[in-house]
Image (cartoon, helix red, strand yellow):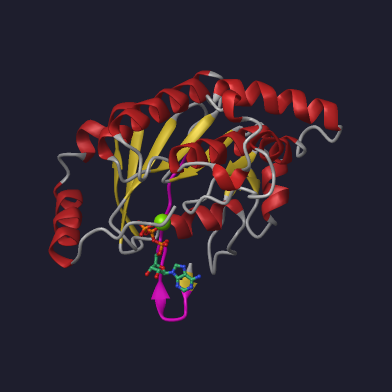
């Protein structure tokens, strides 16, 4: 993916295997969100191909990709502020359940799973950051993803909230969903990921199990480099 003179993703080739949790890490500006945008149809890659279940989905619209079972969340959470939590999740469920009563049933099931049941009648605008992060995942689950891709779903959470999010991710995997997760919180992603891919300055610099990645010289250098330049900017989520 090229933005003018900037190669935001360059020569990035990797596989995601059914049922696994694949982590995506890399310093600020490495190109992680750009990669998610290319995969989920929010950007059309300048070159290259995205295959999902063996089919070429490059350049399809986000809703078409979502229908095929590949669903993403956003780094900056976007709850529908004037709708209740239940209605927000129903919007996701309408992708699979066009009838209102079925969409509501599906949404209620997801609200229980994600711990949002007690807040189902709150407005989207009233939610705290951890609940907005949960709602982001809940909405995505409404579309019954085969592959769920999460963009920093745990940023800004307290350690306890991170643990709850980790449990939720494990539950989602146990139900048969494949996950591809961008995460800066290393304590969260390292214990649950089956494999990790690392981006730095648009390139894939490492791929392997977490135990190998944490010892990889290029990965360590990439993160030390980040420390030298700037403090991690916090996203207003
Ligand atoms: N729509 C765009 N137009 C131009 N440049 C862009 C666009 N989107 C991203 N970029 C640039 O591409 C590079 C990669 O950005 P991206 O948001 O993918 O990084 P990231 O790894 O998700 O970073 P972070 O950890 O801060 O979320 C950055 O230099 C960014 O400024
Ligand atoms: Mg990003």
Q: Position of residue 84 (x, y in %)?
A: 67, 39
Q: Is residue 92 left or right of residue 33?
A: right
Q: Is residue 207 visible?
A: yes
Residue found farthest to the bottom: 5
Residue at 31% from the left image edge and 46% from the top image edge: 184
- Side (left or right) of 235 relative to 79: left
6 within the magenta span: yes
Residue at the (69%, 56%) spot, across then down: 60
Residue 133 in the image: state x and y as whole percent: 48, 40
Is 134 rendered above or below residue 156? Answer: above
Name the residue nearer the viewer: 180 or 75.
Answer: 75
Q: Which quarter of the figure has residue 181?
A: top left
In the depicted view, which residue is nearer to us: 192 or 88?
A: 88
Q: Quadrant of residue 114?
A: top right
Which residues lie in the magenta part? 3-16
Is residue 111 inside the magenta stretch? no
């Amino acid at each position: 993916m090229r933005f003018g003179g900037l190669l935001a993703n360059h020569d990035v080739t990797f596989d995601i295997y059914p049922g696994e949790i694949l982590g995506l890490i890399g310093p600020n500006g490495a190109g992680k969100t750009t990669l998610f945008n290319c995969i989920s149809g929010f950007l059309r890659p300048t070159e290259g191909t995205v295959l999902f279940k063996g089919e070429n989905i490059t350049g399809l619209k986000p809703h078409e990709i979502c229908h095929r079972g590949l669903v993403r969340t956003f780094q900056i959470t976007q709850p529908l502020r004037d709708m209740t939590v239940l209605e927000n999740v129903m919007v996701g469920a309408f992708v699979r359940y066009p009838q209102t009563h079925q969409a509501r049933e599906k949404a209620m099931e997801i609200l229980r799973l994600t711990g949002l049941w007690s807040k189902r009648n709150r407005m989207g605008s009233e939610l705290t950051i951890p609940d907005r992060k949960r709602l982001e995942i809940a909405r995505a689950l409404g579309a019954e993803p085969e592959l769920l891709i999460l963009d920093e779903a745990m940023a800004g959470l307290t350690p306890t909230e991170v643990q709850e999010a980790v449990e939720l991710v494990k539950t989602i995997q146990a139900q048969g969903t494949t996950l591809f997760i961008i995460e800066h919180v290393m304590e969260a992603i390292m214990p649950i990921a089956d494999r990790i891919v690392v981006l730095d300055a648009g390139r894939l610099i490492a791929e392997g199990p977490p135990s190998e990645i944490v010892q990889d010289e290029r990965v360590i250098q990439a993160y030390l480099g980040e420390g030298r330049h700037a403090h991690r900017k916090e996203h207003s989520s």
